Image: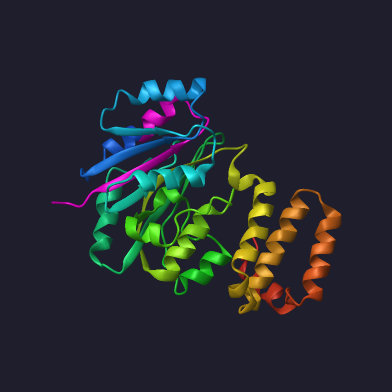
Amino acid sequence: MKKKVSIVIPTYKRNSSVIKNAINSVLKQTYKNIEIIVVDDNGSENDLSREISDGVKEYPQVLYIAHEQNMGACKARNTGIEHSSGEFVAFLDDDDSWDERKLEKQIRKFENSKVGLVYCGIKYIYEKKGGNIERRAIKANNPCKELLIKNYIGSTSCGIVRRTCAIEVGMFDVNLKSGQDLDFWYRLAEKYEIDCVEECLLNYTIYENNTITSNYSNRLSSNIYLKEKYMNVLLEDKELMTIYNLKIAKAYLKLKMYNKTVIHIINSISKMEISLLHVIKLLSQRKLA
């Protein structure tokens, strides 16, 4: 019998029709041994939560869990993992959808027992200006370093993990408001092999406003946090240290915090945490985007 995959759908500030689209995307999968867990992070005493709870009742196969208060996307995903019963766990953000063959194609990669994470390519769909861009999944020669430079894997919605591996690495870090996926993928890549299906099996919607990734305040706090979290790694790699300090400087600049931008750069140079040689190299390789 095929091994069970638990699909965790965290939701926040979305109406029931959006959640139903996500659920229907899962139910269309060609891989059928699944369980669906919707984690409502709106807070239980909330009109939206009541609407979602009523809407999910149309799907008796869905396990619905409501947080008593908003606890963030990381905690919502962790709640889903903790309540899952599958050998594998996949994540689907409430406004994303999957190609119907996604689970079937990615699960095959877990025939290698050393693999802890399998990701796929992503089709980015632009909500307002229309059109889409397909980005096929790639493998990295040094996945840990490449992830700290840039999240080349992508959204949590593209990944499937072995449940035991997710728990072993501590699941999602609830201290992060941005870069949660990068951090989770990094910790999995540290301990296990990771693999991919190159095809674009995730449809990822990009909105014009109010997305976490475009929120430089969240980016700033997260990059400062990640720099401290991985300080031992960064101290051993001048290029990575340079990248993180420049990411922090860029966020200050985008937030028009000019004095802090200058102070951060001066402090980084005085601590020898920014290398001009690596700045030139990174600019030539376009790795400072």
Q: Is residue 91 visible?
A: no
Of the pair 225 and 270, the residue shown nearer to us: 225
In the rendered image, residue 20 lying in the magenta stretch gets the answer yes
The residue at the point 28 percent across, 47 percent down is 85
**Quadrant position of the C terminus in the picture:** bottom right
Q: How many marks?
A: 0
Task: State the image quarter where residue 8 is shown.
Answer: top left
Q: Is residue 221 above or below residue 54?
A: below
In the rendered image, residue 245 lying in the magenta stretch gets the answer no
Colour scheme in use: rainbow
Q: Where is residue 50 drawn, in percent x and y?
A: 45, 21
Task: State the image quarter where residue 58 is shown.
Answer: top left
Of the pair 170 and 225, the residue shown nearer to us: 170
Specify whether 55 is left or right of 67: left
The residue at the point 28 percent across, 42 percent down is 100
Q: Is residue 64 above or below residue 87?
A: above
Q: Is residue 14 above or below residue 232?
A: above
Q: Where is residue 91 drawn, in percent x and y?
A: 39, 46
Of the pair 286 and 17, the residue shown nearer to us: 17
Q: Where is residue 166 drawn, in percent x and y?
A: 39, 57
Q: Residue furthest left?
A: 1
Task: State the image quarter where residue 106 is shown.
Answer: bottom left
Specify whether 128 is left or right of 260: left
Q: Where is residue 145 drawn, in percent x and y?
A: 53, 71
Specify whether 13 is left or right of 261: left
Q: Is residue 115 visible?
A: yes
Q: Which residues are magenta?
A: 1-22
The residue at the point 61 percent across, 70 percent down is 285
Specify whether 284 is left or right of 119: right
The residue at the point 81 percent across, 69 percent down is 267
